[in-house]
Image: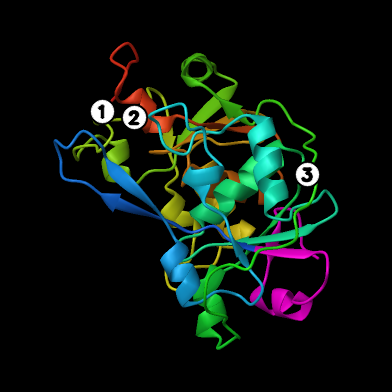
């Protein structure tokens, strides 16, 4: 149904709607940015309103911060325990034999975050290329109203270790010549030229910059093809003989980099889950600026 990297086109998905094993999920979250000095960079708003206003027929909604993140930390969107994820996916009708298609509105990063989480659970999901934006632009069918949901299922994870790492492992990786640490934030944040919502401006020392925004077609909201993406990583010294650690502000947009690296055939790739939301606040960790 899709090449490695788990992309599915709107046309392919339209042809699959109604199949009994298909599960389609809107993963959209919105960030309500708060004034500087408020102590929190943003409030998390699940995309239930925009889901009700229009979604792919039959789709269900997944609330990333609500059901699929660690509730015991102040950091947003942190990967929770496996039992929590198995239960949550099961409640939403995901079984081990389901075919999953994930999409989001405006940006693919919410869908790729769920894709990466599922990868770590040993499950290959698909991401809808262009998301709901492309689906609607093509005049395809839309359903309104709250989620009806799928019948509950049993989801048994087959965890793959190493797809999420913490700040200590990231600090160690940043000084390892066989590892390259990739910042998915925009260049102004990478260079520390603008105030950071997360704390100290700047980057993890030694990290290179491949902004997630440069890996997507801004107009069509689709993923740039591998032959356009490969030179962007190569220019920053990202090669298949090195381990790649990706990070961003909150462990979300970096999953676009990971998704594109996966499509390019990279195997040794991981996410620093805490990202700058954790790093910038921890004065014991070094930070670098231009």
Q: Nearer the viewer, residue 151 or 20?
A: 151
Query: Does residue 17 show up magenta in the picture?
Result: yes
Mark on residue 35? none
Way the structure is coloured: rainbow
* In this rendering, position of residue 189 left or right of residue 38: right
Asked if one can make out residue 220 in the rendered structure from this viewpoint, the answer is no
Examine the image and state in which quarter residue 53 appears.
bottom left
Do labels 3 and 1 touch, CB within 8 Å?
Answer: no
Q: Is residue 154 visible?
A: yes
Is 36 covered by the magenta stretch?
A: no
The residue where tag 1 is placed is 289
Marks 1 and 2 sit apart, C-alpha to C-alpha, by 6 Å
- Which SS class for mark 2? loop
Quarter of the image for the C terminus: give it. top left
Q: Is residue 163 left or right of residue 290?
A: right
- Of mark 1 and mark 2, the one earlier in the sequence is 2
Check contact, mark 1 vs mark 2: CB within 8 A.
yes
| Residue at 55% over, 18% down | 177
- Check disc 3: other Cα within 10 Å, few if <14, some if 14-19, many if 20+: many
Give the residues drawn in magenta, as a range. 1-24
Q: Is residue 107 left or right of residue 245?
A: left
Q: Residue at x 43, y 43 (%)?
A: 184
Gap in angstroms between the C-alphas marked 2 and 3: 38 Å
Quarter occupied by the N terminus? bottom right
Q: Position of residue 230 (x, y in %)?
A: 59, 50
State the residue position of label 3. Answer: 155
Quickly name the residue at label 2. Answer: 203
């Amino acid at each position: 149904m899709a090449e490695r990297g788990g992309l599915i086109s709107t046309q392919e998905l339209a042809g699959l709607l109604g199949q009994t094993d298909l599960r389609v999920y809107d993963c959209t979250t919105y960030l309500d940015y708060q004034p500087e000095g408020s102590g929190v960079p943003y409030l998390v708003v699940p995309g239930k309103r925009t889901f009700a206003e229009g979604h792919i027929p039959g789709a269900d909604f997944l609330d990333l911060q609500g059901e699929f993140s660690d509730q015991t930390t102040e950091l947003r969107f942190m990967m929770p325990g496996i039992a929590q994820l198995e239960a949550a996916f099961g409640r939403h009708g995901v079984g081990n034999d389901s075919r999953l298609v994930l999409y989001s509105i405006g940006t693919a990063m919410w869908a790729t975050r769920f894709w990466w989480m599922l990868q770590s659970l040993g499950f290959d999901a698909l991401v809808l290329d262009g998301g709901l934006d492309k689906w609607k632009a093509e005049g395809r069918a839309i359903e309104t109203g709250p989620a009806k949901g799928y019948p509950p299922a049993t989801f048994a994870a087959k965890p793959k270790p190493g797809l999420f790492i913490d700040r200590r492992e990231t600090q160690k990786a940043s000084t390892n010549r066989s590892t390259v640490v990739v910042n998915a934030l925009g260049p102004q944040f990478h260079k520390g030229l603008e105030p950071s919502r997360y704390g100290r401006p700047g980057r993890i020392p030694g990290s290179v910059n491949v902004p997630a925004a440069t890996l997507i077609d801004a107009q069509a909201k689709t993923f740039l093809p591998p032959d356009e993406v490969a030179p962007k990583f190569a220019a920053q010294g990202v090669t298949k003989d090195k381990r790649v650690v990706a990070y961003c502000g909150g462990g979300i947009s970096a999953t676009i980099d990971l998704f594109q690296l996966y499509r390019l055939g990279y195997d040794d790739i991981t996410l620093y889950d805490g990202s700058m939301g954790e790093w910038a606040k921890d004065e014991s960790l070094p930070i670098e600026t231009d």
